[in-house]
Image (cartoon, helix red, strand yellow):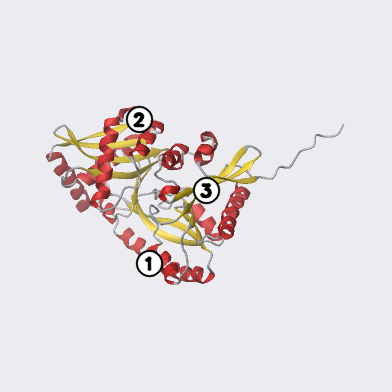
Amino acid sequence: MKPPHTLQVTPQIEIAHSIAQIQADDWNSLAGQHPLLSHAFLNALHESGSASAATGWSPNYLLLRDQENLIAAMPLYLKDHSYGEYVFDWAWAEAYQRNSLEYYPKLLAAIPFSPVSANKILTRDDEHAASNRQILLNAALQIAQESGVSSFHCLFPNTAEAAYLQARGLMLRSGVQFHWLNAGYVSFAEFLASMSRDKRKRIQQERRKVRDAGVTFRRLTGAEITEKDWDFFYQCYVNTYHQHRSSPYLNRDFFARIGSSMSEQILLVIAEQEGAPIAAALNFFAGDTLYGRYWGSTKFVSGLHFETCYYQTIEFCIEQKITVFEGGAQGEHKLARGFLPVPTYSAHWLAHPEFATAVARYLERETKGVDNYLSELNERQPFKRAPPIVLSRD
């Protein structure tokens, strides 16, 4: 009797122009627990029109299938601008324009409007992960080469993925964020006690000013968040953009969708004074990490921003035993409030050889500057002694 014949099926590359074309369970099996990589979050961005072809984010999700099974994927977009990315390449685009070349469109592997570190080449955790990762990256670069775009960019890969991309010839760019790291604190008071005297006093003074102004707080998750709360938060969110004379990226429908589909992964902090809401901050959390995202207010109270965005959220992280609170882009002021500097990365491929060489030289200089900046920040750590936590994250 002959043994059964086993067919060798070659994985197939597909492009999906909407995440709605991908089964949620299939996508989430690759994305893991990361709330901002979840099918619900990305689908809300697209279905609300916040990240769509009309707003310059054309989804071209790169998929690798083995028969009917999704075994790898990449959130890939064709972009005709650089808004909402938090890795600034405007100078590169201007240099192209000065030389009568087109920088846009470009290909971007990223989570729209979200400067959070995570894998962008998503694979199953099995013996084929390495080869599937390589197939997907090769496919993305081939699409970039054959479609005539100027470049391919992967924004905010985690540390391991950044090293992987650099080893395969992409140019690595460094940045800095500030994250709060939980050293096993049992209370906010214990966290404060770990800080140097001057930083501890500043935080105590800021919290006292807010408390003396009669401001109280509600920390809401899941079904506790009502439509009225979402309406107020959206008012705050829009106010923040208008104060900076810019337009908000996200519309009210997006927040309605995430409020319906992923409220258990949302922390909404609302500040109230005399029974009326005056400020709000939106966070996402899952597993050991919380991601601070948006905030806004309808009136000024000294210290209100720090209390709403940082101290209330740190208390939540301590209560829930969350290990890392990613404070979002920029913000050296976070250092004095218990956040520590961590490196972030992006990876880049440019089609034009001369521009690729020029950018590589620029990044070499820029990286040295970022390294020096990180060293300087670490010398100014706000703690009595360095916390026993590894700062680089895989």
Q: Secondary structure at mark 2?
A: helix
Report crowding for label 2: few under 14, some 14 to 19, many 20 or more residues within 10 A (C-alpha).
some
Q: Which mark is residue 369?
A: 1
Q: Is residue 220 left or right of residue 289?
A: left
Q: Which residue is mark 2?
A: 222
* Image-quadrant location for residue 262: top left
Q: Residue at x 50, y 52 (%)?
A: 160
> Can I make out residue 192 in this image?
no
Q: Position of residue 164 (x, y in %)?
A: 54, 56
Which label sits in the foreground, 3 or 2?
3
Q: Tag 2: residue type?
A: Gly
Point out the tag, 2 or 1, that comes first from the N-terminus.
2
Q: How far is disc 3 from disc 2 in space, using C-alphas?
A: 31 Å
Q: Nearer the viewer, residue 121 or 253?
A: 253
Residue designated by label 3 = 60
Percent from the top left, x then y, of residue 237? 28, 43
Task: Describe the element under mark 3 as helix, strand or loop.
Answer: loop
Question: Residue 248, percent across and down?
Answer: 32, 47
Query: Eyeballing the image, is 368 above or below 332?
Result: below
